[in-house]
Image: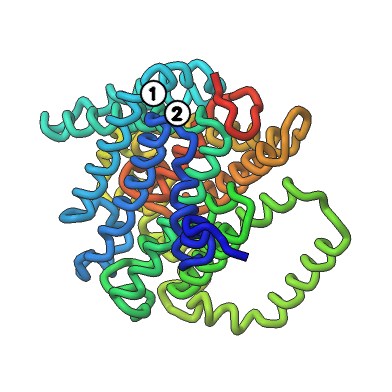
Amino acid sequence: MNLPASFVDRSTTNPGKHRLTAGAAAIFRARSVSTIAVIGTFWAWCGLLSFPMIDLNPDFADVPTSFALGGTVLIGQITGIALFITTVSLMHASRAFASLGRLSLAQVAIIGIIYLSVVLQLHDDEAATFVGVFYTILLMLTALMLSVVWTLPPDDIETCMKVASIIFCLFGISALAVLGLPQGRNVGGIQPNLFSAPLLAGFILSQFHAGKTGIVVRILCFSMAALVSSRYALIGCISALVVHDLTFNSLRPWKVAAAIVALLLCIFLWPQIATFLALDDSSRDLSSGFTGRDEYWYAALATIMDHPLGIGFKRASAFEAGHNGYLKTLVEFGIVGGGLIILFVGCVIAAARAEAVRSTGKDRQQRRFACARLGGLVALAFGAFFQPQLFSLGDAFGVSLLLLLFKPEMKPVSGRAAIA
């Protein structure tokens, strides 16, 4: 049988190249220019939050509280957030303002407290005050702009999350390829928690997509986090997976049996697990405290006692912040303001749980989104005990939390139907 030349060229000549081209084209097929721009700049932001760390100065490797890094890392942070906010402002400004009206009372309250905290910046020199006010306004603006992602059609949201998870996973692979295997838990000059933050974000975002790609991304992200013995990332990955599976799929006898077997294995293999998590390290064992950094916690508590009303967003030093997202929130926004923010974050997580277990009027894709979001919020809420800050604009952990936290309430739709 003689086939037309054009048919032979597409179907029988270099099929691997054809599949790759078709896969790339599928990402942008039937999408508006504005949607492609928003998704594309979000992917670029994800890359700029992670890949510049591969050139990280080795001097930062042993500084657990160092997150405000300079050089290419800072340039990447500024470029990424500026690119995304500018694109959303030009393409979907109306959706951004509409999203504000769809936020829950808890979400609006968090933004309101952040807005009122501007007055806490009015101390010390004018330059520090100006920078603090700028960061506070930028935090509110970023949260609002990220909420626009949830107003895209469900298929676009799934593609957005899928590719973002691949980008974070590729960061880990690239870092290991360029800098080599970990030495003393550091990958080149990248401190373990810095290295694992994009991996945890990639693991969480991969659960928004059903398919083999998501499974591969989760396996790779978890393995690389284990390679540097990042306890918060490993527990966060497991938490996200378990919460997602328990809410998305019904509880069956084999799952209960598997959980019992896993618990027994953990008890039996505890010496090996302790070695794997580096609990035999004098600076990380259980005698050093829950996180191994209790001395930073005491410093943060002292700062809170000295400044019960708060000192303003981004005004705390690394030592004052306590290397704990919740303590830094209290340091920055005060006992009342910070306490209310933590309370309202808990309310948002509780609302996400209610949404995840409620299946009425939702298709399978929407249910998967709800369950993946809940799993991600639980994992990040736990990880905040180990991260230097709860709200951040310069790392994958903080941006992922803002994205999942400020999801507006939308009417359920499926496929490529646009959300009005």
Judging by the rendered image, the residue that carries numbered circle 1 is 92
Q: Position of residue 210 (x, y in %)?
A: 63, 52
Q: Total of numbered circles in the picture?
A: 2
Q: Position of residue 285 (x, y in %)?
A: 49, 74
Residue drawn at x 34%, y 75% is 177
- Label 1 element class: loop
Using residue 244 as the reference point, say whether residue 208 is left or right of it: left
Q: Of marks 1 and 2, which one's residue comes earlier in the chain?
A: 1
Residue drawn at x 38%, y 46% is 43
* Nearest the eye: 102 or 154: 154
- Confirm or deny contact between disc 1 and disc 2 (CB under 8 A): yes
Judging by the rendered image, the residue that carries numbered circle 2 is 148
Residue drawn at x 53%, y 61% is 11
User: Up-down: is 370 above or below 67?
Assistant: above
Q: Quadrant of residue 67?
A: bottom left
Using residue 139 as the reference point, say whether residue 348 is left or right of it: right
